[in-house]
Image (spheres, helix red, strand yellow):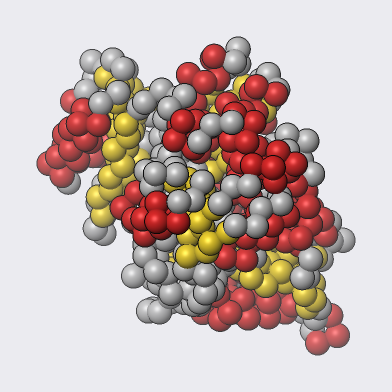
Amino acid sequence: MALIKSISGIRGTIGGKPGETLSPLDVVKFTAAYGTWLLENDKTNCKVVIGRDGRISGELVQRLVVSTLNALGLNVIDLGLSTTPTVEMAVVFEGAAGGIILTASHNPKEWNALKLLNSKGEFISGEIGAKILEIAATDNYSFVGVDKLGTYTQNTTALDKHIEAVVNYPLVDAAAIKKAKFKIVIDAINSTGAIAVPALLRALGLKDIIVLNEEVNGKFAHNPEPLPQHLRELCTEVNRQQASLGIAVDPDVDRLCFVCEDGSLFGEEYTLVAVADYVLQQRKGNTVSNMSSTRALKDVTLKHGGQYFPSAVGEVNVVNKMKEVEAVIGGEGNGGIIVPDLHYGRDALIGIALFLTHLAHSKKSAKQLRGMYPDYFMSKNKIELGKGVDMQKIFSQIQNKYKNNPVNIDDGLKIEFENDWVHLRTSNTEPIIRIYAESNFETTADNIAKRIMQDIRESM
């Protein structure tokens, strides 16, 4: 059981003792702290947008959040079952002071989280997050009397507005997508992707759509992180249906990956690469991804005359770097696409629309499109952390062992090996160390990762 407080929000498992899990008391405490910060920041704007994914605990957490915000005098606009990017955009649509997304993203069904947004519909900064945690630690909030309680309203049109904005985005060619008559299989992982993705595809003019794991019940049919080992059903069904493409999203629809027409994986890391390639053909400019992402994005960016910039891991860090370098496209190698002139947030819906436009314009199959990009192989691994593990000591020992190699310590520890690299860092969302290695050869990437994992275990 766990409770994690980070730039990715307040995240924990449901059930257990307060302070050790995301218990009802913790939901109330951190919601009250966030609401208090909103009121301290702007007493004139009392609107807060909330939305949730399809998790089993979603309704329970939603009721606690609504009541707590109302008790502070804040007016709640509830999108109900929604997606992370829809909530982000709705904050702006509604002119709200902020928003809360109730989702633990790729985590298993036992988890839920409060993802906190500012008035721009973007994730709060680390500095603001620290203030909110301080308010929670000191119980420094005050609830209003009965005459000043906040209101509760529902918004059932936010997803429609989000989809409309995607379809009308200048680089999305709905006519070309409709003409291509793609047959698509979707793995909706028993969450809100089952609502949002088919609705988007229909709005783009597609009719031949098959949805796997369609019931929105939060009982995820498999591990919800869209990794190769979790997508075998989708790969098999794409092949069996002779579909043009398979699409997998995570439970809150901000991550995205594709399956080619032969049932092979397009590659989670190559979602951003392909979308960026298309965008850069239309708009010259810079790109950003986090330093755990494939170097193929840098290759594509340089090919189009732009500059590539790495950021620390975490959506807020990617967004900050994108703003700094005025990137025209960015995101994360986990399938997160950020299109800045739509909104500064990972958004699977705009990613799908741009990818399908690219595919339609290219006149290629998904497999042929993937063949246009350089082949790098990434080995993604993790080690679970026990209590009391001194990560600084571990990183310091490994850095010393590889002191003759180029090293970056901006976010964990990244070590370069000629044309290869390995990045190890503690997760913002789980009690684990992530170890990602990339090489031109799959066995080399695996061997680098295994070697570093052994170094970590020896340092514990």
- Quarter of the figure with the N terminus: bottom left
Q: Position of residue 356 (x, y in %)?
A: 61, 41
Q: Position of residue 164 (x, y in %)?
A: 78, 52
Would residue 107 be visible to someone looking at this image?
yes
Q: Position of residue 312 (x, y in %)?
A: 48, 35
Residue 309, relative to residue 106: is it above or below? above
User: Residue 135 sits in which quadrant?
Assistant: bottom right
- The residue most toward the left is 458
Q: How many marks?
A: 0
Using residue 215 as the reference point, say whether residue 379 is left or right of it.
left
Using residue 38 as the reference point, say whether residue 275 is left or right of it.
left
Would residue 338 be visible to someone looking at this image?
no
Identified at 80% across, 76% down, the residue is 153
Identified at 38% across, 29% down, the residue is 409
Q: Position of residue 457 (x, y in %)?
A: 15, 44
User: Residue 16 sits in which quadrant?
Assistant: bottom left
Identified at 62% across, 36% down, the residue is 360
Q: Nearer the viewer, residue 166 or 155?
A: 166
Residue 398, relative to residue 179: is it above or below? above
Identified at 81% across, 87% down, the residue is 146
User: Residue 87 sits in which quadrant?
Assistant: bottom right
Q: Nearer the viewer, residue 84 or 8?
A: 84
Using residue 434 as the reference point, say whether residue 100 is left or right of it.
right
- The residue most toward the bottom is 146
